[in-house]
Image (spheres, coloured by chain):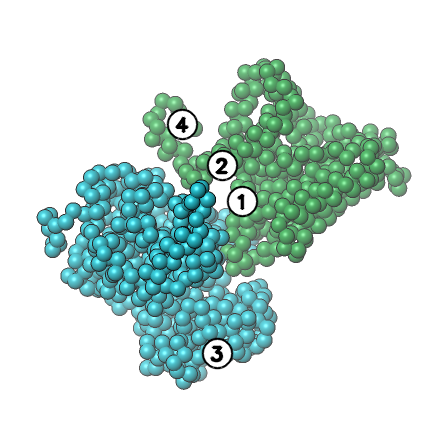
Chain colours: A green, B cyan
Amino acid sequence: MSTQTSPLTSIRRTLSSVDMRAVAPFIALIVLIIAGAMVNPRFVGLDNLANVATRCAFIATIAVGATFVISSGDLDLSVGSMVAFVASVMILFMNTQVFASPLMMVLTAVLLAMALGALCGLFNGVLTTKGQLEPFIVTLGTMGIFRGLTTWLSQGGAITLQAQEQQALYREVYFGRFFGVPWPILITLAVALLGSLLMYRTRFGRHVVAVGSNREVARHSGINVSRVRLYAFMIQGLTVAVAVILYVPRLGSTSSTTGTMWELQAITAVVIGGTALKGGSGRVWGSIAGAFILELVGNIMLLSNFISEYLLLAIQGTIIILAMLVQRSLTRRA
Amino acid sequence: MSAIGDQGPVPILAARGVSKSFGEVPVLFSVDLEILPGEVHALMGENGAGKSTLVKILSGFEQPTAGQILLDGNAVNLPGNGHSERLGIALIHQELNLAEHLTVTESLFLGREITKFGFLDRPAMRKVARDALDELGTDIHVDALISDLSLADKQMVEIAKAISRNARVVFMDEPTAVLSEGETDRLFAQVRRLRAEGTSFVFVSHKLGEVMALSDRVTVLRDGQWIKTDLTRNLTADRIAQLMVGRELSDLYPVKHEPDVDAEEVLTVENLSTGFVKDASFTLQRGEILGFSGLIGSGRTELMEAIAGLRKYHSGSVTVNGTPLPSANMAATREAGVAYMTKDRKGRGLLVGERIRPNLTLQTLDLHERWGMISGTSEAKALKRANRRFDIRVRDPRVMVSQMSGGNQQKLLLAKIMELAPGILIVDEPTRGIDVGTKQQIYQFLSVLAREGHAVIVVSSEMPEIIGLSTRVAVMREGRIMGMLTGDGIQENNIMRLASGLRVAA
């Protein structure tokens, strides 16, 4: 950023030489941390920030997947319900205790969650590509389906992990630390790293962006457009599964309200992160920053006394609209 | 210099010392331009010379960095976003600017609908629209959807729109690029009629013949500088081309090389039929440039897309070097060494919101992979190679494709296709809307390619291009190949007769 003292033209010149859409989310993040520090000194403590990062792990992980779907020009509204559904099936499976060894149980459950997540994504993807339906309609439908299945599985109540040994073993995944860093943070970073490698360094990533920016150009370039879109939905499903794997050990329980409005948060995180909602640009690390920003806002509201934390959802809704406005104005300048 | 001296009529619109920079990149340097009442003023220059920018400034879509705009002799700040229409200044964009979902009438009255008691007065609007279209001598239906119209008809609607808004100056950026000859003639007749009534036109075109036929005065820009303004009758087409390029243009078309008599057949198409194309059969030899001529909509593109694996064919066969190609399988086409360059460089060829490099390698990323990861150095090498080979001129390699000139975009598209290293290259309208200098480069390239033993198919609606390049010409009409012309038979009137159905197969 330029200093305040330099003339306006030179600021503009500096700004136009960097891609504002890529940097904006990180600037917002820094501004927010400074604001938080002014509200409450406890806020900038390493413990508090690590806490916030841990809690945003679910949304951040899902947002990495959503970055692929949105970059390819689609949208997945079903992720929140998908979390509830996959988590419920996972816990029900763990409760069967088909294997004697708790470790074996947990590992199989993790694999099961991944497979189920990928399958849910495949379902969304097949309906949008082979069925040639609007992704908005498809995932609005599956949002209802996954939610309904969860309510039915739990019979309107809660599904709780009963096996004590499994719980003891598994809770480390959320509450444990590795060299002092909570596992959820490490896993989120790993997912983001894999995601960014996939997005920026592989053929598939380039194809995702091409498909999202102009399907006809992609088709004329020999890209199998349907397959790329389908894989993006499956990646979304896999990241939902990772979020579930982190989520289950936290409470060891799900209900019909698990993951409600997470789709809003995930999409908000992606948009804050600088990914264009109409497709054609993917910013994996931006989405991580976006998820962190959302959680920080909640945290600041909690630590301050002047905004009621009951307004959280309203604030998050406001943020997505603001993010879109900023994106729009930055695009126009370019 | 000019026959019109200082005592002449007051220009309707004038640019005085107008300069423009985008960021730090200057694109216009203190340019002067005067538009007199009732004249057709041609604005000429190579791609990137600054014509489009000057037109945008004079119509208010861009603001000059320095200099003045004079309207009727008074300095003005033109309002942006098309509001200059109220001042009588209309711009017909190169990419037509119509909402596809509206009807013709709705488009004409967009933003100034006629109302009665606050409700739309549709009958009144229809009537005015009909009159405007009748005046242009076109029978487009006033309730037709824009999306159902041909490009030529869309252009007519744009012109009707400008005229119905009492435009005094109409800017047309390459109005004939998408028009057939008949449509062009009709458009020009209207321009002449309106000129007689006092409307001024500023006309950007790369077609020298049209400029000579239609314009009263010509202004030439080169590299953002004003070079010359003169009466058209004082100039010749060659002279204008020279002024644009700044050097002598040797013959536009390279010397033709007939393929060897016994050169092998690399492509055989037999009785190919798609939805529209019927029973197309032809062969292509190594070292040959085969032209495909015909009117717009005669099925040439559909045929080529079927050969290139972009479109299904339901009967017939495509054989490359003795191996039959499956229908609609681009991977197999690529394997066989067939590549097709689309005529729609912005809609189908290039990702205009991306930079040069990802566009260049999009179709051939597998060649740049190491252990599943794309190697940036390998891509950079390809970019360097392509820049050298195709002379893509950009001030900054990080520039977005949308900000490149048409000629550079076309060269990039050709470079992208050539990354496939095809043995058989099919190019569709390879020089649409680009300047003479770049055209010449592309012709040279195709000619060298053929001489090196590749086989080339050129699909073009520009007759001189087909005649100047091809050693054989196939002419299509309504989905069928009407005839094949060779040697001295490759002449404009022969092509026209086949294309319009006056003569059946030779």
Q: Do badges 3 and 4 share one subunit?
A: no
> How would you rate the neighbour count of disc 4 (Cα within 10 Å): few for under 14, some for 14-19, many for 20 or more?
few
Q: Does dot 1 land on a helix, a strand or a loop?
A: loop
Determine whether label 1 and label 2 are within 8 Å by CB. Answer: no
The residue that label 4 is drawn on is A2
Q: Nearer the viewer, residue A76 or B453?
A: A76
Q: CA distance from mark 1 to mark 4?
A: 31 Å
Q: Residue at 63% of width from left, 55% of height from top?
A: A132
Q: Residue at 74% of width from left, 27% of height from top?
A: A175
Q: Nearer the viewer, residue B381 or B306?
A: B306
Q: Amino acid at mark 3?
A: Phe
Do we see residue A72 in this rendering?
Answer: yes
Q: Which mark is residue B51?
A: none
Q: What chain is tagged by disc 4?
A: A
The residue that label 1 is drawn on is A278
Q: CA distance from mark 2 to mark 4?
A: 20 Å
The residue that label 2 is drawn on is A327
Query: x, y (%) of residue B162?
Result: 33, 52
Determine whether label 1 and label 4 are within 8 Å by CB. Answer: no
Please determine whether, in this image, residue A262 is positioned above or below residue A207. Answer: above
The residue that label 3 is drawn on is B282
